[in-house]
């Protein structure tokens, strides 16, 4: 029987190109380790990249006003475009304030994720593994509390650290998937 997604449970790309997946995983681990080692620089880079993306998005939205066919469409495109452009410029011109703002948004994201995870786990109670949803929700809640309690003092480094940790674990996941893909081709 040929190896397929049905026989292995793995996406076809994993057993067709496990070396590529492995390489991307290693790259993620290395980049994540760098982000963890240089969290302030990573935080600044994230903030500046977001600022640049907001400026580009704002300019594109403003350009879209040219193609709007009615007053509402023009007004909506100009208003949203101007808001994105101004927000992006504020991030680019004031990176430290931008990092403070992003840190609060990340704390809010962890609080929202905690609520959703705990609510989902509660709805799934009795299903095998539902307690992992509770654990995940409590971890998100704890991280949100730690970020909010440490704000603004931890703002300079927490974004870079969290980004680095996420990259490392994403890389480990890709490496594990590539190893599973390699093993499935040996079947």
Image (tube, helix red, strand yellow):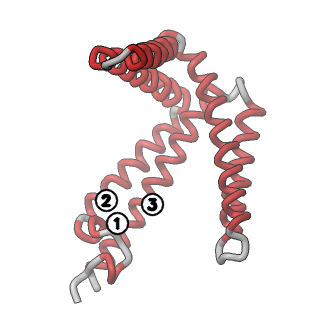
Q: Separation of disc 1 and disc 2 at Cα?
A: 6 Å
Which residue extends farthest top?
Answer: 93
Q: Residue 178 carries which label?
A: 1
> For the point 27% across and 82% down, which residue is it?
186
Q: Which mark is residue 21?
A: 2
Q: Give the vertical position of 115 relative to 44 (above or below).
A: below
Sequence-earlier tag: 1 or 2: 2
Q: Give the vertical position of 134 relative to 82 (above or below).
A: below
Where's residue 169, x and y in %? 50, 54
| Residue 160 quadrant | top right
Q: In which quarter of the image is the C terminus?
A: bottom left
Sequence-earlier tag: 1 or 3: 3
In terms of depth relative to the viewer, which is nearer, 68 or 141?
68
Q: Are marks 1 and 2 in contact (CB under 8 Å)?
A: yes
Where's residue 118, x and y in %? 71, 57
- Element on which disc 3 rests: helix
Which residue extends farthest front?
Answer: 70
Q: Residues within 10 Å of mark 2 (few under 14, many from 20)?
A: many
| Residue 59 quadrant | top left
Q: Which mark is residue 49?
A: none
Q: Residue 173 carries which label?
A: 3
- Element on which disc 1 rests: helix
In terms of depth relative to the viewer, which is nearer, 147 or 22?
147
> For the point 45% across and 58% down, which residue is it?
172
Counting labels gives 3
Q: Separation of disc 1 and disc 3 at Cα?
A: 9 Å
Where's residue 107, x and y in %? 67, 36
Q: In which quarter of the image is the N terminus?
A: bottom left
């Amino acid at each position: 029987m040929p190896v397929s997604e049905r026989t292995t449970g793995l996406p076809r790309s994993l057993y067709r190109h496990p070396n590529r997946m492995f390489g991307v995983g290693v790259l993620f681990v290395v980049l994540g380790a760098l982000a963890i080692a240089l969290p302030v620089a990573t935080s600044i880079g994230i903030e500046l990249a977001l600022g640049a993306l907001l400026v580009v998005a704002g300019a594109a939205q403003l350009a879209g006003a040219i193609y709007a066919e009615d007053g509402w469409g023009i007004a909506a495109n100009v208003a949203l475009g101007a808001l994105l452009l101004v927000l992006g410029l504020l991030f680019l011109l004031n990176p430290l304030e931008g990092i403070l703002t992003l840190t609060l948004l990340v704390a809010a994201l962890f609080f929202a994720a905690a609520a959703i995870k705990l609510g989902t786990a509660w709805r799934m109670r009795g299903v095998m593994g539902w307690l992992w949803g509770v654990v995940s929700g409590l971890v998100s809640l704890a991280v949100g509390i730690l970020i909010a309690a440490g704000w603004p003092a931890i703002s300079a480094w927490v974004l870079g650290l969290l980004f680095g940790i996420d990259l490392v674990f994403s890389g480990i996941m890709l490496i594990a998937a590539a190893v599973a893909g390699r093993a499935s081709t040996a079947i």
